[in-house]
């Protein structure tokens, strides 16, 4: 050790303090975009996620639309803003919007019993309303434990399956998340309009909003910029599991979309292009049970509603076939974060929350003065 290169204890402490101050200053001077980018890259490594698409929008306008990692590992294709992911249950908000369109047109009533639309339904469906299907309070459950996702079911067969399952509880008395309830809403849309629900969404929502790539899933079609879905098996990356084509067309969450399309969707939700403001507010209000109590999960129609560190947020996550998705709209702050990932074990909801915190901490406090 050379004597002139040694530091006294005091000098070492001063150097350490100066170094820490430099790091803190650099972090304070970095932009939200830089901090969010660093965070997402770190989460990709931590969670072993092949690729992520990130959208941050304010006041209905894109602040950041970016891709991280790989959309396709085998071909080494990078993720882009144009990359197409599968929606999972984030697709439920589109199904709910379609039903509310029919409500506004007088073709459906929220308090109609399901037997009005399904004449051969079991007697217990007389007590189930459209409102309860939308809010997961109808007594419907999820797919049976031994359900065959590789059988090419018809709509009629799926309806008969749902009808054959006894209600798990009296309608309106409990909240229980139900993919079968939203599958049934898709069939209801078909019964009322004569259109497959996916065609109805295309004609009434996607095309009018310019959501050019959003559509029902089809693994047979050529879909530009389509990501591959993955899962971890004993720590090793594997391709998504295959399901029958019809199981990629149900209304519980079977869409392709990109963050660019979801930016158009987010912008439209600030307007009345699709629904009246009163209808949107109803969708974003937690439904009460028959006893007048909140449903316990803060669920409206196709959206969860809650608070995050004092900020009001409407949000939803999705999972399907090696994909995870999350959308979080901080409505009072007019901030939206969307995270799309192509790994079954990813945690996009946590990532979206953290990214939102980065951007919310950077903005000026809201003036709540009347």
Image (cartoon, rainbow, N blue to C red):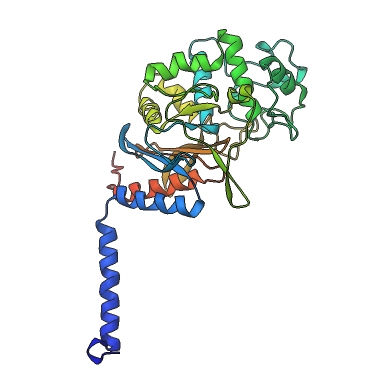
289 relative to 49 in the view: left or right: right
162 relative to 62 in the view: left or right: right
Tell me: residue 49, above or below residue 84. below
Q: Position of residue 324 (x, y in %)?
A: 52, 39
In the rendered image, which quarter is residue 167 located in?
top right
* Front residue (pair 168, 156): 156
In the rendered image, which quarter is residue 111 located in?
top right
The residue lying at 28 percent from left, 43 percent from top is 367
Q: Is residue 238 visible?
A: yes
Direction top: furthest residue: 194
* Front residue (pair 231, 252): 231
Direction front: furthest residue: 75
Q: Position of residue 223 (x, y in %)?
A: 46, 25
Tell me: residue 247, above or below residue 351. above
Direction left: furthest residue: 4
In the picture, the quarter occupied by the C terminus is: top left
232 relative to 278 in the view: left or right: right
Q: Position of residue 218 (x, y in %)?
A: 54, 23
Q: Position of residue 30 (x, y in %)?
A: 27, 55
In the rendered image, which quarter is residue 115 located in?
top right
The residue lying at 39 percent from left, 52 percent from top is 39
Direction bottom: furthest residue: 3
The residue lying at 68 percent from left, 12 percent from top is 118
* Front residue (pair 2, 172): 2
In the picture, the quarter occupied by the N terminus is: bottom left
Q: How many marks?
A: 0
Q: Is residue 59 visible?
A: no
């Amino acid at each position: 050790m050379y004597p002139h290169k040694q530091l006294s204890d005091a000098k070492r402490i001063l150097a350490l303090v100066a170094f820490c101050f430099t790091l803190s200053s650099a972090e304070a001077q970095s932009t939200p975009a830089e901090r969010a980018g660093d965070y997402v890259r770190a989460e990709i490594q931590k969670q072993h996620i092949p690729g992520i698409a990130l959208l941050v929008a304010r006041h209905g306008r894109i602040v950041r639309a970016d891709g991280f990692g790989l959309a396709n590992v085998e071909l080494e294709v990078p993720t882009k803003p144009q990359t197409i992911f599968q929606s999972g249950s984030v697709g439920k908000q589109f199904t709910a919007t379609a039903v509310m369109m029919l409500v506004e047109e007088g073709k459906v009533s929220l308090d109609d019993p399901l037997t009005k639309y399904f004449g051969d339904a079991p007697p217990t469906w007389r007590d189930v309303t459209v409102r309860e299907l939308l809010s997961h309070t109808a007594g419907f459950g999820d797919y049976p434990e031994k359900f065959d996702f590789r059988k090419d079911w018809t709509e009629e067969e799926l309806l008969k399956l749902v009808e054959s399952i006894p209600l798990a509880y009296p309608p309106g008395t409990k909240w229980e998340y139900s993919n079968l309830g939203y599958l049934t809403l898709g069939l209801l849309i078909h019964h009322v309009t004569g259109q497959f629900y996916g065609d109805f969404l295309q004609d009434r929502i996607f095309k009018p909003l310019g959501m050019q790539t959003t559509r029902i899933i089809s693994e047979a079609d050529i879909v530009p910029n389509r990501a591959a879905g993955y899962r971890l098996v004993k720590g090793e990356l594997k391709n998504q599991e295959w399901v029958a084509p019809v199981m990629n067309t149900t209304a519980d969450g079977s869409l392709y979309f990109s963050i660019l399309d979801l930016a158009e969707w987010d912008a439209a939700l600030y307007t009345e292009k699709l629904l009246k403001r009163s209808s949107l507010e109803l969708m974003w209000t937690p439904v009460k049970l028959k006893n007048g109590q909140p449903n316990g999960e803060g669920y409206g129609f196709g959206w969860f509603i809650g608070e995050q560190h004092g900020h009001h947020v409407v949000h939803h996550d999705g999972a399907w076939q090696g994909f995870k998705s999350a959308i979080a709209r901080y409505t009072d702050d007019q901030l939206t974060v969307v995270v799309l990932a192509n790994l079954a074990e990813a945690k996009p909801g946590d990532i979206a929350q953290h990214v939102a915190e980065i951007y919310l901490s950077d903005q000026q406090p809201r003036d709540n003065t009347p």
